[in-house]
Amino acid sequence: MTLTSMQTLIIICMVTIGTMITRFLPFVVFRGTKSNSYISYLGQVLPYSVIGLLVIYCLKSVSFKAPTYWFPEAIAIICIVALHYWKENTLLSIGVGTVIYMVLVQTIFV
Amino acid sequence: MSRLKEEIKALKAAFPPTIPVFTGYIFLGIAYGILMSSKGYGMGWTVLMSLLAYAGSAQYLAVTFLTSIFNPLLALLMTLMINARHLFYGISMLEKYKDTGKFKPYLIFGLTDETFSITCSAKPPAGVNRNWFYFFITLLDHCYWVLGSAVGGILGFMVSFNTKGLDFVLTALFVVIFVGQWKTQKEHKPAIIGVLCSVICLIAFGPSNFIIPSMLAILLVLTLSRKQYVAKKELMEGRAQ
């Protein structure tokens, strides 16, 4: 554990509050009223932008100083994209991609 | 028909549509539990998080908040951003969940991607109480997720293997969602805006400070391109008709 128990509990509360705001907000805001066109526009486009942001967030610490630093990520992501385009099986793509990455960083690019 | 019989009937009807979610949640829950225990967080923490937050990708993301400097505000903001898609689910379910009475708070609480994908399409069979039907779908999915997390938490401590690189499961999850969205969506601009704003902010602000600027940049660019998006969409829908 990096954080103390109290800090961990606060983070859990934050994740819970954040999630519940996004789940309850539409039901609270649109109680009996017509839906707001700006909010529904954001609801349509934001999911796509946010996943793009999250992919970059996950890769934020990848170094480009030497090819061996970013090779494992690049190889694993290419495999995931290809596999997912082909089979479109979420669990298969995640499982195979993660195993490929783990093997690469544990054996070849140590 | 007695009350209990009615409930059992609804449970029986609710189980089959949740089977695909069972597989998914058990697998992802186990991976989550193992990941948490590899960072030193025991089963208790894992189960508490899965029980309360009950949001797969946000929980995976939260592993990074639990393993870096304590920053609750960033945790809240990132969770809001990653779960912003739920706003859309909520808007889509306003009508369906309107008259669900005492079940409503729990149905909204448990409206995950997977539960949404079932409840927005599955219809209760004739003679089955629809409120109990939606309630059991939501409850079963919630149980699968908590169960998977618990099993993962136990496995993580019992089985010792080299977990180096296991964090990549988070990257894999988002890449898979990204590809899935790319395939189903005709309009790629929001996805491209997300990636480009983030990359530019990452270069400009560095890895530890780029998230909030990226969020603001994405909101700004999306807001500015709203008119164009709406016009294009109307044009596409006009063509389709």
Image (tube, coloured by chain):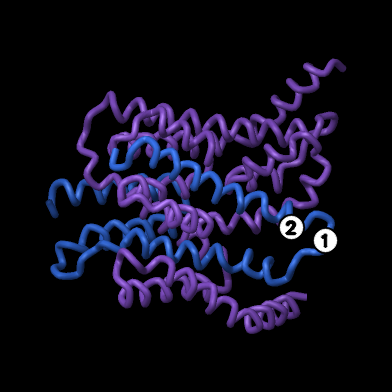
Chain colours: A blue, B purple
Q: Is residue B2 above or below residue B145?
A: above
Which residue corresponds to mark 1? A33
Residue A87 seen: no
Identify residue type, mark 2.
Val
| Of B96 and B51, the residue lying toward us | B51
Element on which disc 1 rests: loop
Chain letter, disc 1 residue: A
- The numbered mark at residue B80 is none
User: Taking A79 as reference, is B160 left or right?
Assistant: left
Residue B52 seen: yes
Q: Is residue A40 above or below residue B124?
A: below
Q: Residue B24: percent from the left, percent from the top?
A: 49, 39
Q: Is residue A12 above or below residue A80?
A: above
User: Taking B113 as reference, is B39 left or right?
Assistant: left
Which residue corresponds to mark 2? A29
Q: Is residue A24 above or below residue B30?
A: below
**Which residue is depicted at the point 19% across and 51% down?**
A104
**Quarter of the image with the N terminus of chain B in it:** top right
Q: Residue A42: percent from the left, percent from the top?
A: 62, 68
Alpha carbon distance from label 2 to label 1: 8 Å
Identify residue type, mark 1.
Thr
Q: Give the image quarter of residue B225.
A: bottom right
The answer to the question of whether label 2 and label 1 lie on touching residues, with beta carbons closer than 8 A, is yes
Q: Residue A93: percent from the left, percent from the top?
A: 39, 50
User: Is the residue marked by circle 1 packed among few (<14), some (14-19), or many (20+) residues within 10 Å?
Assistant: few
**Quarter of the image with the C terminus of chain B in it:** bottom right
In the image as oriented, which residue stretches furthest toward the right?
B1
Chain letter, disc 2 residue: A
Element on which disc 2 rests: helix
**Which residue is depicted at the point 82% across and 18% down?**
B3
